[in-house]
Image (cartoon, rainbow, N blue to C red):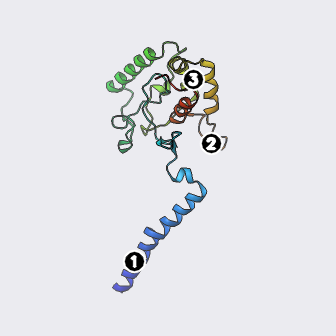
Amino acid sequence: MLLSSIRATAVLLFLTCAVYPAVVTALAQVAAPSAANGSLLRADDGTVIGSSLIGQSFTSSGYLQGRPSAAGAGYDAGASSGSNLGVTSRKLADRRAADLTRLRAENPDATGPVPEPLLAASGSGLDPEVPPEAARWQIPRIAKARGVEASRVEAMLDEQIVGRDMGILGEPRVNVLAFNLALDRRFPAAR
């Protein structure tokens, strides 16, 4: 009885820890190799810049900025979480006020109010995307910093908008890292 239990455990251990992961990994490599390998984005020289699934902090005026991150010191994948601050939290109100002041100062030519997604951190703190309206609001700053017409940056933004998944799921969005890589390719920043 004990020997048959040990054999059954060994067989199940082999199946669940070796065979099953190997089969799933092989299927993923065939069905969706980019996603299976982390959805990595690369520079023209092949250097990995990041993943399209994890946000990064961009502070230079020539780049699209994403949502604020509540993960660790900002976009820390090891500390992925929301801030868990409620609507009555003084700390949240102070952070939002500071972000609002900073965004208005950095985007003096932007029209309209600061889009809400640029003030509200995502639940994971690692959101790699912003809605098209939040990206469009930043175009005057980006165009000015890169020395190009805003209409050219806006046309490029329109090319980068990802629609709803399967036509019905989610909202249209712009991947911040992919857009910034495309900006560097099309309109290199003056150095």
Marks 1/3: CA–CA distance: 57 Å
Q: Nearer the viewer, residue 190 or 174?
A: 190
Marks 2/1: CA–CA distance: 42 Å
Q: Residues within 10 Å of mark 2 (few under 14, many from 20)?
A: few
In the drawing, what numbered circle is on residue 140?
A: none
Marks 3/2: CA–CA distance: 21 Å
Nearest to N terminus: mark 3 or mark 2 = 3
> In the image, what residue type sits under mark 1?
Ala
> In the image, what residue type sits under mark 3?
Arg
Nearest to N terminus: mark 2 or mark 1 = 1
Q: Nearer the viewer, residue 166 or 52?
A: 52
For mark 2, what is the residue? 165
The single residue placed furthest to the right in the displayed view is 167
Nearer the camera: disc 1 or disc 3? 3
Residue 152, quarter of picture: top right
Q: Residues within 10 Å of mark 3 (few under 14, many from 20)?
A: many
Nearer the camera: disc 3 or disc 2? 3
Percent position of residue 117, x then y = 49, 28
**Secondary structure of residue under mark 1:** helix
Percent position of residue 181, x then y = 53, 34
Which residue is rendered at x = 48% and y = 12% of the image?
108
For mark 1, what is the residue? 10
The answer to whether 121 appears left or right of 152 in the picture is left
